[in-house]
Image: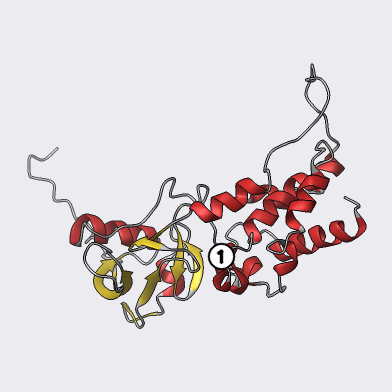
Amino acid sequence: MGTGTLEKSEAAEVDYRVAVTFRIRRFNPEVSAEATWQDFELRIDPKERVLDALHQIKWEIDGTLTFRRSCAHGICGSDAMRINGKNRLACKTLIKDIAEIKNGVGSKAIVVEPIKGMTVQKDLVVDMEPFFQAYRDVMPFLITTGNEPTRERRQSPEDRARFDDTTKCILCAACTSSCPVFWSDGQYFGPAAIVNAHRFIFDSRDEGGEERLEILNDRDGVWRCRTVFNCTDACPRGIEVTKAIQEVKQALITRRF
């Protein structure tokens, strides 16, 4: 073999990043009582998610940017926010799907703001306590009577399928904060609470259906729904929220569930 050096050709690294503007609604009660808008210019891979862009802004540009996130895989529901006017999970929203990219540049800013109908605490973080209180009020747990069983409570596949859709809720509040009735009256239980009541009302093993129905029969309960379908459109898990609400209404009328 020759002793000459072996020349290696290396392919030039391709930069797939594009220029995108993120317009974020900022609010810090320690600084001002008014919210403001702030633009951030990023170069980012369009296959990344909005959550990745928020991380880049916080870690590299402005460490004061405040938002919630946990699992980053669409399961915890903590990073629900309004993105381009629609409730979405930041961890599931791809930049390429919303940035309208032309010639390597996002033609329109990606607008990010907190979900509506809840008190903003800072930037994209809202007070979730009223939302979770409504959830607790519908008793989202199995209610049974009699002695503690010595074996699991069995259920047929057909009985399980009856409420399968509403077991998918991750309590992100995307549905509730997209509801016009909830915007105008925060006392309304909201779609998420009703969905989680539905999950147990139609569970064949549960014995608390009547009690939950009476809770939702309140003036701030299920009858406040105006069937706008915003909640169904906003659900990142694809739950037929409006259908579940209608089934609860029907159960209240017929007392069959």
* For residue 242, above or below residue 104: above
Drawn side of residue 38 relative to residue 172, left or right? left
Quarter where residue 190 is shown: bottom right
Quarter where residue 205 is shown: top right
Give residue 88's position: percent from left, percent from top.
50, 64
Give residue 226's position: percent from left, percent from top.
71, 74
Residue ID for mark 1? 186
Colour pattern of the rendering: secondary structure
Give residue 86's position: percent from left, percent from top.
51, 72
Drawn side of residue 20 relative to residue 205, left or right? left
Seen as rendered, the residue at the extreme front is: 219
- Nearest the viewer among 149 and 110 is 149
* For residue 137, above or below residue 179: above
- Nearest the viewer among 98 and 249 is 249
Other-residue count near label 1 (Cα within 10 Å), few / some / many at <14 / 14–19 / ≥20: some
- Nearest the viewer among 100 and 51 is 51
Identified by mark 1, the residue type is Gly
Q: Secondary structure at mark 1?
A: loop
At horizontal 25% and vertical 57% (from top left) the residue drawn is 58
For residue 48, say whether it is visible.
no
At horizontal 86% and vertical 61% (from top left) the residue drawn is 250
Give residue 51's position: percent from left, percent from top.
38, 58
Q: How many marks?
A: 1
Drawn side of residue 110 relative to residue 86, left or right? left
